[in-house]
Amino acid sequence: MDAILTLATISAALRLAIPVALSALGAVVSERSGVLNLGLEGMMISGALAAYSAAEATGSPWLGLLAGAIVGVLAGAVLVAFVVYGRANQIVTGIAVSLLAGFLTTYLFQQNYSIGQVPPRLNRIGLVALVLLTVVLLALVWFVLERTVFGLALDAVGEAPEAADALGYGVDRIRAIATLIGGGFAGLGGAALVCGPLGLFIENVTAGRGWVALALVVFAGWKPLPAVVGAFLFGLSDAVQLRLQGTDSAVPYEFFLALPYLLTLIALVLRARASRTPAALGVPFVRGTT
Amino acid sequence: MTLTIGVEPRAGAVRVATSAVRSTLTVPIVALLAALIGGAVLILAEGEDPFAVYWTALDGVLFGPRGLSDTATAATPLILIGLGYALAYRARLFTIGAEGQYLMGAIASVALVTAAGVRDLPGPALMVIGATAAVMAGALWGGLAGFLQVRFGASVVISSLMLVYVAQAFLQWAIRVGIRDPDSFIPASRELGAATLPTVPGLDTHLGFLVAIVTGPCLALLLARHRLGYRVSVLGHNADALDANEVASRRVMLAVIVWAGGLAGLAGFAETAGVNGRLGDSASLGYGFTAIIVALLGRLHPIGVVLAGLAVAALKIGFEVAARSHELPSSLVGVIQALVVVFVVAGDALVARGRGGSR
Amino acid sequence: MTDPACAVTDDGATVDTTADRGRSAVVMRGIHRRFGTTVALGGVDLTLRHGEIHAVLGSNGAGKSTLMKIMVGLDRPDAGGVTILGEAVDRFEPRAIRSRGVALVQQHFTLVPTLTGGENLVLARPEGRLRPDRRACRDRLASLVERYGLEVRGDVVAGAMSVGEQQRLELLRALDADARVLLLDEPTAVLTDAEADQLLAVCRRLAEDGRAVAFITHRLAEVFSGCDRVSVLREGSAVISDAPIADHSRADLASAMVGSESSGTYSRRASRSDEAGAALLQLRGVRAGRLHNIDLDVRAGEIVGIAGVDGNGQADLEAVLSGRTAPETGSVHIGGATMVVADPRSRRSLGLAYVPSDRYRWGLMRPMDLADNLELGRVPRVRGRRAHRREAARPALQAWDVRSSGPAARAATLSGGNAQKLVLARELHDEPSVVLACYPTRGLDPNAADAVAGRLVDRAALGAAVLWIGAELDELFAVSDRMFVLSDGELIGPFTSPFDRGVIGLAMGGLAPGSAPSKPDRSPVPELEQQEPSA
């Protein structure tokens, strides 16, 4: 049990954290505009499959990342059409998107790789590059949210859409942009999962990480930096459980399997009341209802 | 004057009512058809003739040797879980974690029924004990997510799903260590023995199916004629009004999610005791997620959920039959099922938009 | 303060504005607007002139707000034309019209509560794509504060400001965009008298700078104390259009507003019982939220009116008395029994009926039918068939004159007045001994308001203790046996009939009458005194 926090563990933690961090960043953007993106898990896995296919076809994992982001944006567009312009229930729609993406990716993957056949491993992107990418994107998101007028308008649309509307901001347009950005980040997160050190796509490869990202956004109080920190803590618990699984311990290894999700749940519970939810989160905007 | 007020608006009310009924039925039917058309495109892409595939599937379900009974068996967990979702969603509690409650129900019932001292009881008693244990375990697991929501404000959507992963890990431990059959080479639970659900004569499916079919109307009655049903409606439409006039909304929330969890737990027992006879590595088949489709396709109405459960199960069984004579990947049917729910959501949005436009 | 004849634009250029004086700034001709079958505006003309304050009068639902929304592009007319500063409006779109120099200060504020005053300014009129830091935001607000003499704190989020401060911020934001046309929708509704006077003085200064100011109100006094011209709307048409104030008397305008019938004809009870009944509602030393140490008895057969400016503790009083929240200290007794918290059914069985301030939030389920709405709080464990339930609801709907398409109609289809009658039908059905009525006539047309007030008065005549929290003084004067003023969380009073408007007005402004003990540690004029720059 000694030296759990070795360099290997830390790097494993980073590897496991990056996909969650990217998705959580995307969720921060879309949720601050008032759109609850429960399709996040679906967008991640769509991005993962797109990235794997593109990277395998071209041999370039960077193109894979790009493809993942693009497919994430496209999946975001589906959500936008439904919840922003169609004013559909955001929760049900998000769940539907996640369900569809889960089944569809499994189907498309089986199309190309029959069961039992080992899919080829990708050229992988190094961990350092991914960490740098995440840091750059974190800085970018922070800058846009905190230092631009667009970020101010985004908050206004998530807090008081009728006020933003009265000031002439297009509520639907801003929410659409935020949701597309969120989708792109989620797709990128999925892509980072397969184009990173894993280098593989397997069915249900995201294993609920999209939902974990959503919980972390609450934990982070809808702020980008705490969201990334939260993702690292998730990655750390995931890395530790992977390490402990192999050791002879009195605690059954299944406990460690459940540990990252338990910790996410605890984080959610601890912070749910303390963080201030954007006032209009999940509420479709219809002019003149308030 | 009074005369016109008395007559004219009533006609209006009837019109409103019929249009509501029409969209209630139209949306799911159109969604189902649209999903089948979407599926046809995928079948074409596979190089198969969609008409032939659908015909084989329909023929297999209706006239195949085990078509109807397999459909009934497959529908059983979907209906039970779907009924729980319908109840919860009516109260606007969007739980998605029935898979966890299903597993906990299954594990608890197997553990209790196969425990030393209990397992020698007569079959009917074991079935009652197993079902009760499953309902209570599912209710507890669901209630935990509900408790976290009403006590800490933690979104039940996310917390219920996190608990699915915990339950899956628990299942792995249970079949490896906790309730392992010592004679089994691979991890698997002890066998249920006398608690195995009997086959219903004439239907060729297990007793759980009857329970599921009867639960639908019971829940419909509860919603329409019992105070809890009324409170669920009020909670779904205006929780503040419920708090101010009727009862603390958190109590209704907890009740709803406990009931929904109990139904999912019962499904876990029905599936284990009716089909598999024991718990294995593949006990988590995702019924908890497919049942979301069933609940939404059934318009959150208990009778609708029963019909939708049968329809979705028929789709699954039909494709299994069709896959024997056609080259079809097993995952295709999942895509069609998911398309159903997407089209239901789209249809609802369109209907709402149409109403809003005519306002 | 700048020279009144000159306005300084942001780049520092000075423009002579006196030449504009009296010229038309906004011309609206033949404006029609209907919502479904309701005609909100049926051909209204209105002209706003530079250098003048134009009062737009009308009772609730007369079409004032719709007219203003059209002027700023938040709504569009079905027919008719609008000309702003000489140019016809072809696109009714908020941003386009705002850029022409028209600004609306709405009844419901359009500030973002989580942003500071300065950030709200930046949001309304950004300079470039980057967002200035907090200090730059604060400085921008500070320069406006200095220029117009309207005190607003720069680094406090809007949600933490009092309504008066929020309104000043709204006004500054409109001025920041150098609005030439300022529309104020019921700006004094939430202000104390002193604040309202201050606001009128500011408007006068702004008009002297050459701006056109429209002042929407239903308070006659303000029209005469501060406006140049007046238009009166009634049921969607202008009964008086662009008339100089001097041409009209108060009585003229009052009758123009309400039509031939006079207003406020609540069925005043013929005889008020002088005998004090038993105290059915008792508050003892209640502290909760803004409330401190409230003692109050409401006796059988009397109506006690609670007046006061919104935000002085009314919401806390409502929450405690309706059993939604527990008082921090003290207790509430209904007919001698202690109030239960968070158990509305036992509240009802104690005999307390509750007419909430926001009927759509606390009182009704809009998507559910009328029969279901009538059962809220009274539903039996096992219910009858739906058809029977609906049939059973019919007599109540008729008795309470709820006009609808029948018990199967959804509550959402009811007008405001009928929705309120539905709430009353349910709450008064079981002959409650205590009635808590919070702003029961808010948003209702005069007929519906009369009907609702009449029902509550009847209930008191039958022996109920009624506590009426209200905003309209005339209405409270008409219905109350005794009155209190809620000011900064304390009850001032009681006042008894005949009510002295002057004394009660002062109490609402935080100035307790000489007899009432004044607390040395508290400022007597909370709102105005606290404006002194604190940071």
Image (cartoon, rainbow, N blue to C red):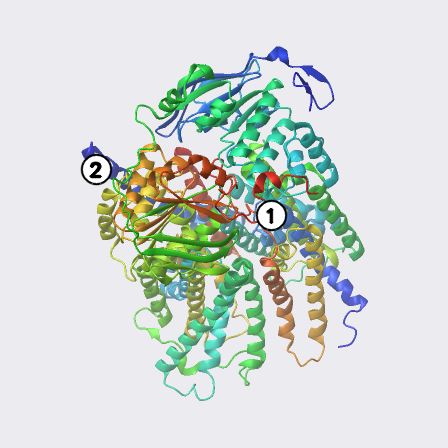
Could you tell me which residue is drawn at 34 percent across and 65 percent down?
A: B215
Q: Nearer the viewer, residue A265 or B347?
A: A265
**Quadrant in the rendering for residue C282:** bottom left
| Residue C268, position as x, y percentages in the image | 29, 38
Q: Nearer the viewer, residue A31 or B63?
A: A31
Q: Are marks 2 and 1 on the same chain?
A: no
Outermost residue, left side: B3
The secondary element bearing badge 1 is classed as helix
- Above-or-below relation of C245 to C376: above
Return the chain for callout 2: B
| Residue A6, position as x, y percentages in the image | 80, 69
| Residue C219, position as x, y percentages in the image | 44, 29
Return the chain for callout 1: A
- The answer to whether residue A234 of the structure is visible from this angle is yes
Residue A31 tag number: 1
Could you tell me which residue is drawn at 69 percent across and 49 percent down?
A: A54
- The answer to whether residue A59 of the structure is visible from this angle is no
- State which mark lies toward you, 2 or 1: 2
- Above-or-below relation of B209 to B126: above
| Residue C110, position as x, y percentages in the image | 56, 36
- Above-or-below relation of C131 to B95: above
Q: Gap between marks 2 and 1, in whole Å?
A: 49 Å
Q: Residues within 10 Å of mark 2 (few under 14, many from 20)?
A: few
Label count reads 2
Q: Amino acid at mark 1?
A: Glu
Q: Nearer the viewer, residue C56 or C282?
A: C282
Q: Residues within 10 Å of mark 1 (few under 14, many from 20)?
A: many
Give the left or right position of residue A180, taking residue B146 as reference: right
Residue A76 tag number: none
Screen quadrant of the N terminus of chain A: bottom right
Give the left or right position of residue A227, taking residue C412 as reference: right
Q: Name the residue that disc number 2 marks.
A: B6
